[in-house]
Image (cartoon, rainbow, N blue to C red):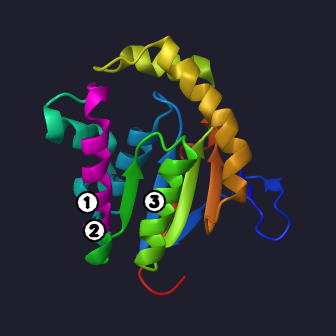
Amino acid sequence: MERDKTSGEQQSLRSLITLPQRALVVLSGPAGAGKSTFAQRVVKMHKDQGLQATTIVSSDYCRALVCDDEANQHANRDTFDLFHYIIHKRMYQNRFTIADSTALLPEARRRLLEVARQHRYTTCLLIFNISPEMCTQRDRKRERVVGEQVIAYHIGLLQQTLIDAPKEEWEQMHILREQDLAVPIEICTRPC
């Protein structure tokens, strides 16, 4: 689903999401929703346009860089300092960037909006509205399992995000359900 900027109403997701080269795509959703898989698919689809694995700035990877443990929640402050720093530096270099974290708290989304505005980047929020059952099923297959309790907490935050995010200043906002996860993203090389 996506939000119509003029009416604020939800409408069916288009068959294509079109973004300029200078865009920050923020992935928001619970653990196990398929955010990282989606981001990797976007990069793979646009290899010929120069996208690489480094296009994706992952909070999990930043946490591993900081403390050698993706699961160590005690390193969150340093993790997100690095996360935002890398995003800022990518924008400084005019690079298409995908921010891969849960982004389920308003403050997390606000910080990403601020850095994008600072660099005059187009902002796109993709909210992964995936069922708790699907998230739990995917979580069980992952190398680093977060568990049902964390997913239940994230699902509660997701419900609030679905209420709050339409009031935020995203230039594009799309709500992806399970059937929408294959939606293609087009990256314009000329002005869109």
The circle on residue 86 is 1
Which one is in front in this view, the residue at disc 3 or the one at disc 2? Answer: 3
Q: Does the magenta stretch include residue 85?
A: yes
Residue on which disc 2 sits: 90
Q: Does the magenta stretch include residue 97?
A: no
Question: Residue 5, how many percent across, how many down?
Answer: 76, 68
Q: Main secondary structure of the magenta part?
A: helix
The circle on residue 164 is none
What secondary structure is marked by label 1? helix
Contact (CB < 8 A) between labels 2 and 1?
A: yes
Crowding around mark 2 (Cα neighbors within 10 Å: few <14, some 14 to 19, many 20+) is some
Q: Work out how far the residue at label 2 is from the one at label 1, CA to CA, in angstroms.
A: 6 Å
The answer to whether 155 is drawn above or below residue 180 in the figure is above
Looking at the rendered structure, the kind of residue marked 3 is Leu
Q: Work out how far the residue at label 3 is from the one at label 2, CA to CA, in angstroms.
A: 13 Å
Contact (CB < 8 A) between labels 1 and 3?
A: no
The circle on residue 112 is 3
Tell me what residue is drawn at x 66 percent, y 52 percent.
165
Snapshot quadrant of residue 129: top right
Image: magenta residue range: 71-89
N-terminal label among 1 and 3:
1
N-terminal label among 3 and 2:
2
